[in-house]
Amino acid sequence: MVVQNFKHFNGDAHHASGSGNEPEPMTAREPDEDRKPDSPRTVLLLQGLMGRVFRRLGQQLIKSGHKVYKVNFNGGDRLFWRLPGGIEYRKSLDEWPDTLRTIIAEKGVTDVVLFGDCRPHHLVATAVCRELDVPVHVFEEGYIRPDWVTLELGGVNGHSSLPRDPAWYRQLAAELPPVPEHRQVPSSFRRRATEGLLFNVADIFSRWYYPHWANHRPWHPVIEGMGWARKLTRGKDRRKEAVALTERLLTSEAPYFLFPLQLASDAQIRLHSPFASMTDALMLVIRSFAKHAPKDARLVVKEHPLDNGVFDWLEETSSIAALLGVSDRVDYMAWGDIVPVAERAKGMVTINSTSGTLALAKGVPVIALGHAVYDIPDITFQDGIDRFWREASAPDMETFGAFRRVLIERCLIPGGFFSEVALDKVVRHAVARFEGKGLLPE
C-alpha cells in the first residue's frame, strides 16, 4: 500500500527540483463563495508532526476559504498530505532559502505554518520569513498539559518572545476574561506509534526521489521503525511494572522527586539547554541527587511517552545510578500516567519539558535546567539544582495562574494530535486563530 502511493510522483504535484520540465502546479480547490472568510489567507505548510495533523489542518483551511500549499520534503510528508497544493522539494538545504523566497512570491503566501522551529529547514524558513515580513505560526506539544497544543507566532520555548517578568503576566492576566470551559480529549499511543511506523516506511521507499533529504532526527528511519515496533511488543510487561511502581510510590510515605525525560531527538535539548544530550542531563541530575538530596528521598526517572524505544533509558539510568552509588534510591517508570505521580512528588526536575507546567498547576515545586518559557521567578526554583533537593518551594499560584491565562490567550489552543476528537478540536481552533478569533465554544 505504501509503495503504491509513490508510483506516480509526476502526476499530481508541483516539484521544486529545478529540472525545468515539471507539470503545472495544482492549486487548492476553490471553496463555496459563502464560505469565504473576511480576509482569506494563502497558507504555506512546511513539515508537521508525523501523521495526519497537517492534512487535517489543510482540509479545514481550504473548507474555510483559504488557499493552502504544502511543501513535502520526503515520502512521509507526501504520504500523509495527499491533497492539492503539494510542492515536492527535492533540492539541498543550501538551495532552500532561495526556493522558499520564490514559493512565497509566486504563490502570494501570507502565512507559514510549521511544527517545531528548530528543524534545519524550519530554522532557515523562519529567517527567510523574518526577512520578508511573513508571519510564522509554530506548532508544538502544549506548554500546558494535557489537552492543549502550542500555536505560537514567531517561535517557541527558547525562541519565544514571551517575557520572563512575573509582574507582566499578573498585569496582563487581570485584563483578560476567564477561560471558556475546556474538556479533555482522548489520546492513543498506538495511533502515534503506527503513524510513526508508516511515516518511516514511506520515507525509506522514497529516498530515491528525495536525494537530498536528511532527517532532523538522529536515527535512520529503519532503526527508528524497529524501535517503535519493539516498544509496541514490550508494552504489556512495561505497563505491569509501571503499575506496580506507581502503587508503591502512592502508598509509601517515602518522599520522592520526579525527573521526566525528554526525547533524545528533541531540539529543545540540543539548542535550548546546556546539555548535548539527555544522557548528560541524566548524569548531572543523578549526581546532584546523590550528593545533595536527603538520604530518605528517592528519584523517579519517567520515560517520555513518545520515546521511540531506540535507546534503552532504563539501562542507562540503572548504570548511572550504580556508578554513583544510589541504585537503591532511583526508580525508572517506563509507562503510565504522570499526573498522580507528579501530584505526590516533593519536586520535579525538568530541562524545559511541558511536564513542568503540569506539576506547577498542582502546586509542586519545579526547577528548569534549560530555557523554558515557564522558568520565571515566583513560579520555578531559581537557586540551582544542588539546593533544590532540600530547599524546593512551591510556586506562587497567583502568578502561575496569571502566566497560564496569558499563555492560553497568546499561544495555546485546545485539543491534541493523537485521536480524531483531539484533531478536530485542534484544527477548528487553529483556523479560528488564523482568522483573528478567540477560543471557540466547546
Image (tube, rainbow, N blue to C red):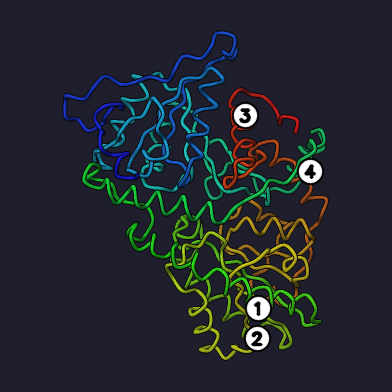
The residue at the far left in this view is 20
Residue 276 sits above or below residue 248 on the image = above
Residue 249 picture location, percent across and down:
74, 77
Residue 9 picture location, percent across and down:
26, 33
- Kindly identify the residue that appears in the image at 66 percent across and 36 percent down: 410
Residue 20 shown left or right of residue 205 in the figure? left
Residue 209 shown left or right of residue 147 in the figure? left
Q: Residues within 10 Å of mark 4 (few under 14, many from 20)?
A: some
Q: Quadrant of the C terminus?
A: top right
Residue 422 picture location, percent across and down:
63, 42
Contact? badges 3 and 4 (CB < 8 Å):
no
Q: Quadrant of the N terminus?
A: top left
Between label 4 and label 2, give the one nearer the viewer: 2
| Residue wearing tag 3 | 433
Name the N-terminal-most of marks 2 and 3. Answer: 2
Residue 299: give its label.
1
Image quadrant assignment for residue 368: bottom right
| Residue wearing tag 4 | 170
Q: Amino acid at mark 1?
A: Leu
The residue at the far top in this view is 33
The residues tagged by marks 1 and 3 sit, at their Cα atoms, a distance apart of: 41 Å
| Residue wearing tag 2 | 329
The residues tagged by marks 1 and 2 sit, at their Cα atoms, a distance apart of: 6 Å
Contact? badges 1 and 2 (CB < 8 Å):
yes
Name the N-terminal-most of marks 1 and 2. Answer: 1
Contact? badges 4 and 2 (CB < 8 Å):
no
